Amino acid sequence: MTDHLDRFHAALTVLAGHGHIKQRLIKAFEDNLVDIHEDELPVAIKQSFADLRHEMHRVSPLNGEGAICASVRKMSLTEASEIAGRIVSLYGEMARQRDDMQSSLPLTEAGDETRVPPFLVKSV
């Protein structure tokens, strides 16, 4: 999941960058998210990502452009902004899930009873 989280983070960096929202959305998705498959993602965001993928491929391309470019070209500025917001939300959900997984891990392995060295014990 860390690789996917890194890819979403890279997409956010592009979305927060300079340029027109539609250009940033195309670049963010094509460069970072296009080859992520929803089956590789946590259950909680699979359907949301599948819906996002569908939105980014909903228009048939013309004149050699890709489906992503064609789909974003047909979006209003409001729609493009909403899609960008969904990418941010998906990143946030993935980060929360990663944090939840890490906080539930045991600090020591079973049977690994580590004793405190005598020099670290505070003397009274």
Image (spheres, rainbow, N blue to C red):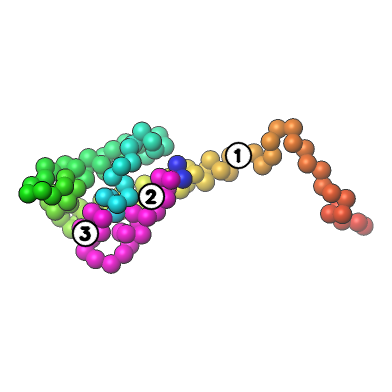
Is residue 43 or residue 70 the one in the foreground? 70
Q: Secondary structure at mark 3?
A: helix
When asked about the image quadrant of residue 112, the answer is top right
How many residues crowd mark 3 within 10 Å: few (<14), some (14–19), many (20+)?
A: some
Read off the residue under disc 2. Answer: 7
Residue 3 relative to residue 77: left or right: right
The image shows residue 84, relative to residue 57, as above or below, that is: below
| Range of magenta residues | 3-27
What residue is shown with label 1? 105
Q: CA distance from mark 2 to mark 1?
A: 24 Å
Depth check, front residue: 57 or 94: 57
Number of residues whose C-alpha sits closer than 10 Å to that of mark 2, classed few (under 14), some (14–19) or many (20 or more): some
Residue at position x 24%, y 66% in the image: 19
In the rendering, at what x and y percent does residue 81 appear? 24, 56
| Foreground label between 2 and 1 | 2
Name which residue type carries label 3.
Answer: Gln
Q: Residue at x 11, y 42 (%)?
A: 60
**Mark 3–mark 2 distance (CA, rounded to whole Å):** 18 Å
Q: Which residue is mark 3?
A: 23
- Report the number of discs: 3
